[in-house]
Amino acid sequence: MGGFFGCAATKTCNKELFYGTDYLSHLGTKRGGLATVGKDGFQRSIHSLENAYFRSKFEADIDGLTGHMGIGVISDTDSQPIILHSHLGTFGLVMVGKIVNLEALAKKAFDRNVHFSETSQGDINPTELVATLICEAPSFKEGIKNAQDKIMGSCSMLVLTESGIFAARDRLGRTPIIIGKRENSFAASSESSAFSNLGFEVDHILGPGEIVLMTPEGRETVQAPGEKMQVCSFLWVYYGYPVSSYEGINTEQVRYNCGAALARNETEKVDLVAGIPDSGIGHAIGFANESKLPYMRPYVKYTPTWPRSFMPQSQAMRDLVARMKLIPIREIIQGQRILFCDDSVVRGTQLQDNTQILYEYGAKEVHMRIACPCLIHPCEFLNFSTSRSTMDLAGRKAIYGIEGTEDIDLAEYAVDGSEKHRAMIAYIGERLGLTSLRYQKLEDLVAAIGLPKEKLCTHCWDNSSYY
């Protein structure tokens, strides 16, 4: 997915920029970058994060970034920030999202004899494409709006100029931007969790398509928000840090609500409730509180030397990391009927390994409860599961196993309680070796978040979305 942080202050802001960006490390896997502007002009630093953490890569660069305004990014895709010289002046740019019509936009640029110099995995760098769209207009405000109007998918951005930072949320608000304020400085972040320990208070939440100009002295809305919104539901289910709030709704509380909803629909008799660390813990606490069952930790996560399980780029290494960092406790597992909560099942490989370990350690039964509906459509709007083909999704693999073909109508499989939905869930549960498997009902997830369904993107589950 990725995340960004920007800061405008009356004095050097490199420390705030460094720590603010670091607090977003859970959102991305590939590249990190920082850029500042001040009396010494624009300065930039970019490093790979595939084999190391953000802090260890950027600590040596901080003192050299002396500007009073800056932007930082944790990127899942290309190297950012980029610095461009244009008729608008020199500017830096970071973006989060996915440009579905990138090839079509690039072709139009080629037809005007525009060229691209940056590459992203052998293709056109999406951040440079956004910069090109900005430069088609006579001002930054009009250029950003031009980019937002032409991009299909999603694209939220920070634009660093010599006079301020433009924060622009994507047209349908799929990814959030929050403005923080403290004395003599303002900050913009993908997550509010980046503010707390830096002394910022939430000052403003950008609406869909809104553009704000942020300076050390204040902020100004230069384009009002639109009325339509489809913010990504997965922010609350999985991506978001527990401290963060989106649209004023806290992530951890939503996970408690999800777990409680699962508990209200529960029919199995179990001895204890547990969460797959870390993203399943909040859901499990909510389940335990609602059901009055004991919450325990059959698995403990070992983090000092193991990176995030989705950081390594090969699937084999991701699976190895996921298995090695979870240490089972035999005394809690042996002879028990255990109900686990987790955020989602994407491929199911890690869950299958974890289930097998539980049986090896003497579990009597292993029940799995998933906090969201079954994923049967790949994400088209963010960079969630983009490295996986459609048939890698556990739900689609089960449907193919049932139907023997990919050319079918998926609508009935998305309806909880339908005959085809029950067959799909049974197929997945049997493949994973579970005693029972149950997913969250979509209406319960929507209720747990607390926004109207039309304001949420639920494409992964029911193919409901618009550009």
Image: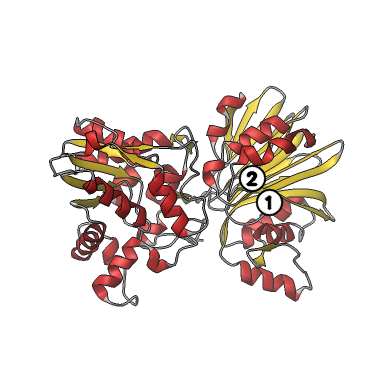
As helix, strand or loop, the secondary structure at mark 1 comes to: loop
Q: On the rendered structure, is 291 left or right of 109?
A: left
In this rendering, position of residue 382 left or right of residue 291: right
x then y, percent, for residue 97? 57, 54
Q: Which residue was labeled with disc 1?
A: 80
Q: Which residue is mark 2?
A: 73
Answer yes or no: is residue 164 visible.
yes
Q: Is residue 289 above or below residue 433?
A: above
Whether 252 is drawn above or below 50: the answer is above
Label of residue 241 in the image: none
Q: What residue sits 32% from the left and 56% below the top?
A: 374
Q: Position of residue 361 (x, y in %)?
A: 23, 43
Marks 1/2 in contact by CB < 8 Å: the verdict is yes
Residue 194 x/y as whole percent: 57, 33
As measured in the structure, the alpha-carbon distance from the residue carrying label 1 to the one carrying label 2 is 7 Å
From where the camera sits, is residue 200 visible?
no
Picture coordinates of residue 128, whole percent (x, y): 71, 59
Q: Amino acid at mark 1?
A: Gln
